[in-house]
Amino acid sequence: MSDEGDLHKKFENPKPVAVGDLKDVTIESQGGHGDGIAKIEGFVIFVKGASRGETCKVRITDVKRTFATAEKVQHGDVEESTDDEIEGGKGGPSG
């Protein structure tokens, strides 16, 4: 019985991505349905509308047991808080 449990645990490793994550990837190949295929720590990511050789920022939309799906994000779609955090400091004693 422990062999069956060990076999199941083999597929329960933590995934390197989660839904909503933003990642920079390079598309290594094309899938049969035209999606780009990238890998993060060996974990396959299917990227809708991406082409082989393209480097892009993607948002993870779904995570399955052996792969994830993602969509490319435009620069305006990415929430960047670093500029706001720096500007937010202007109201303090030094600003």
Image (cartoon, helix red, strand yellow):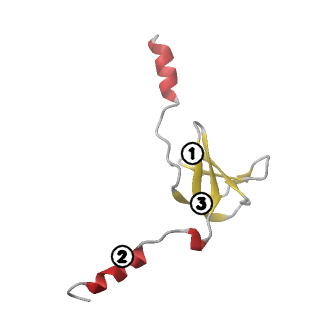
Residue at point 47% right, 21% down?
A: 6
Rendered view: 95 above or below 30:
below
The residue to which callout 3 is attached is: 58
The amino acid sitting under disc 1 is Gly
Residue 73 at x, y = what percent?
61, 65
Residue 59 at x, y = what percent?
57, 58
Secondary structure of the residue carrying tag 2 is: helix
Rendered view: 76 above or below 41:
below
Q: Which residue occupies the foreground of this view, 23 or 61? A: 61
Q: Residue 85 vs residue 42: left or right?
A: left
Q: Which residue occupies the foreground of this view, 82 or 52? A: 82
Count residues near mark 1 (Cα–Cα under 10 Å), then give few for <14, some for 14-19, many for 20+.
few
Q: Which residue occupies the foreground of this view, 81 or 9? A: 81
The residue to which callout 1 is attached is: 42
Marks 1 and 2, the one that precedes in the sequence: 1
Alpha carbon separation for disc pair 1 and 3: 17 Å
The amino acid sitting under disc 2 is Glu
Secondary structure of the residue carrying tag 1 is: loop
Between marks 1 and 2 in the image, the one whose residue lies nearer the viewer = 2
Secondary structure of the residue carrying tag 3 is: strand
Rendered view: 36 above or below 76:
above
